[in-house]
Image: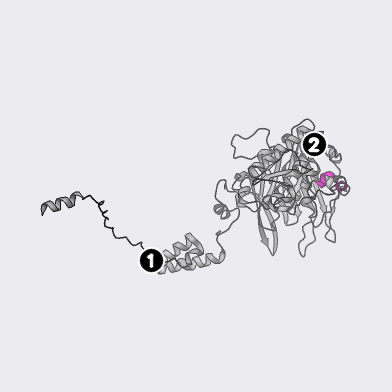
């Protein structure tokens, strides 16, 4: 299943918005820079990026999420001071595949009704017949996985998937991190070792995919040690809990994603053939800039049948995708009331530098320099226009070196003194012998 288009009404900061999304194709693109399964959403804090991901989850899984799945619709309806709130409505056009039990397009709508408090309620609706597999937790249909920004891995000690399933329906549990902060990720050591004997082929596929997603920074060893998978990083083999926060943050949700891909894959198909939707808030969370330059292309190419809907603030991520992959959230304010506007990117920034992207329409910064230093530069530019060559040179040094230009320059190095040429020292003639020159001098006398 994929989401072809999404319409949002009265959801949090959204009054009304609609967007057509990129959907994976059946054939790989001829241009390697094209990523047909990627949708990257940009926007300021509070502009509604997380709300778009929640809307996508509610649209794709609305029939089961609204019927005792464990989801509590907390403060979803848009509330404006001085006005009575209207119902929130989310509509979507879905593309179903054989894996979902049906093929072709389907339309679904989810409605949330406001209440007096902060907890809203879902409006009951008739369930379409094609949605019946959502209630079958052994079905490979309707794979949707979502990750909020506050993601962390459950400790392996005492972890129980059975206990987790008692409070949430399976398909809600897969996206619960978008709605709840306390939701934890499934640890790799709790599920992958069993596949070594139960399904060796899938075990091999998971290890291969993990290494694709970790390359070139890390590698997972194929065989666990004392029930723990070790990661080869910087010349050492370390268990998950011994890794740095950055590695744990990335490996944690990647391993959780592969868990759901593995458990929800149709029998007889390779894991990379599994279709579904992956929603990730702040995909660049804790990632070093070098990783940020790789994470989206790596995900998209390793799992080409999954539709990715991602949010980020990173210009490095934006520079790795084409303009057709980018969607921008802007805010509009009228009479003190703000609303969010979602629209496709109007600029092609693929391949630009981070500075160029930050000063483009995607981020809208006037400068990437510190604002206080920009004011100082403006004052120095005025001084350069009104002053002499020294003021102009100082301004150019500030532009090139920043604050380092105002540090006292080291005194010029003193030129090295040339040593006077030394006269050749004549070696005394050996005793009993006279040199030729002395002999000639005597003869001359």
* Magenta segment boundaries in residue numbering: 163-173
- Residue shown at the point (55%, 50%) measured from the top left: 353
Where residue 176 appears, x then y in whole percent?
80, 50
Q: How is the image coloured?
A: one colour
Tell whether position 444 is magenta: no
Gap between marks 2 and 1, in whole Å?
74 Å
Where residue 403 appears, x then y in whole percent?
51, 64
Q: Would you identify the image quadrant in which residue 254 lies?
A: top right
Is residue 222 left or right of 409 when viewed as pictured? right
Q: Would you identify the image quadrant in which residue 423 lies?
A: bottom left
In the picture, the quarter occupied by the N terminus is top right
- Judging by the rendered image, the residue that carries numbered circle 1 is 389
Is residue 312 left or right of 411 when viewed as pictured? right
Q: Would you identify the image quadrant in which residue 301 lies?
A: top right
Task: Name the outermost residue toward the top.
Answer: 268
Compared with 96, 405 (above or below) is below
- Judging by the rendered image, the residue that carries numbered circle 2 is 195
Closer mark to the observer between disc 2 and disc 1:
2
Where residue 5 appears, x then y in whole percent?
71, 43
Q: Residues within 10 Å of mark 2 (few under 14, many from 20)?
A: some
Query: In this rendering, does residue 37 appear at all?
Result: no
In the picture, the quarter occupied by the C terminus is bottom left
Sequence order check: which comes first, mark 2 or mark 1? 2
Main SS, magenta residues: helix
Query: In this rendering, does residue 294 appear at all?
Result: yes
Tell me the SS state at disc 2: helix
Tell me the SS state at disc 1: helix
Which of 34 and 78 lies nearest the eye of the viewer?
34
Q: Residues within 10 Å of mark 1 (few under 14, many from 20)?
A: few
Which of 425 and 139 lies nearest the eye of the viewer?
425
């Amino acid at each position: 299943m994929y989401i072809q288009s999404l319409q949002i009404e009265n959801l949090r900061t959204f009054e009304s918005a609609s967007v057509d999304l990129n959907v994976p194709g059946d054939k790989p693109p001829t241009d390697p820079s094209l990523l047909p399964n990627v949708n990257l959403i940009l926007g300021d804090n509070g502009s509604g990026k997380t709300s778009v991901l929640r809307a996508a989850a509610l649209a794709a899984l609305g029939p089961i999420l609204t019927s005792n799945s464990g989801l509590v619709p907390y403060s979803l309806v848009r509330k404006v001071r001085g006005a009575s709130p209207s119902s929130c409505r989310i509509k979507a056009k879905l593309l179903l595949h054989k894996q979902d039990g049906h093929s072709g397009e389907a339309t679904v709508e989810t409605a949330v009704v406001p209440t007096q408090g902060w907890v809203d309620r879902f409006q009951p609706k008739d369930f379409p017949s094609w949605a019946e597999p959502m209630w079958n937790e052994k079905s490979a249909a309707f794979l949707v996985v979502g990750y909020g920004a506050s993601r962390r891995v459950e400790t392996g000690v005492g972890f129980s998937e059975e206990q987790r399933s008692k409070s949430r329906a399976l398909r809600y549990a897969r996206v619960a991190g978008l709605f709840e902060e306390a939701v934890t990720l499934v640890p790799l050591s709790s599920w992958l070792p069993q596949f070594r004997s139960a399904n060796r082929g899938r075990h091999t596929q998971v290890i291969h995919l993990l290494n694709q997603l970790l390359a070139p920074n890390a590698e997972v060893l194929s065989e666990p040690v004392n029930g723990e998978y070790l990661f080869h990083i910087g010349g050492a083999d370390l268990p998950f809990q011994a890794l740095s926060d950055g590695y744990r943050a990335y490996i944690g949700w990647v391993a959780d994603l592969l868990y759901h891909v593995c458990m929800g894959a149709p029998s007889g198909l390779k894991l990379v053939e599994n279709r579904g939707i992956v929603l990730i808030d702040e995909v660049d969370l804790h990632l070093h800039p070098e990783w940020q330059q790789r994470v989206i292309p790596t995900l998209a190419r390793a799992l080409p049948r999954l539709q990715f809907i991602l949010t980020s603030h990173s210009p490095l991520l934006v520079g790795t995708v084409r303009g057709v992959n980018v969607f921008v959230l802007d805010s509009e304010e009228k009479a003190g009331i703000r609303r969010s506007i979602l629209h496709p990117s109007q600029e092609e920034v693929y391949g630009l530098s981070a500075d160029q992207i930050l000063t483009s329409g995607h981020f809208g910064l006037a400068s990437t320099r510190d604002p206080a230093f920009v004011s100082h530069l403006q004052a120095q530019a005025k001084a350069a226009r009104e002053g002499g060559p020294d003021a102009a040179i100082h301004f150019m040094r500030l532009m090139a070196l920043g604050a380092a230009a105002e540090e006292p320059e080291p005194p010029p190095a003193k030129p090295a003194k040339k040593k006077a040429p030394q006269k050749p020292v004549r070696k005394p003639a050996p005793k009993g012998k006279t040199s030729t020159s002395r002999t000639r001098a005597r003869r001359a006398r």
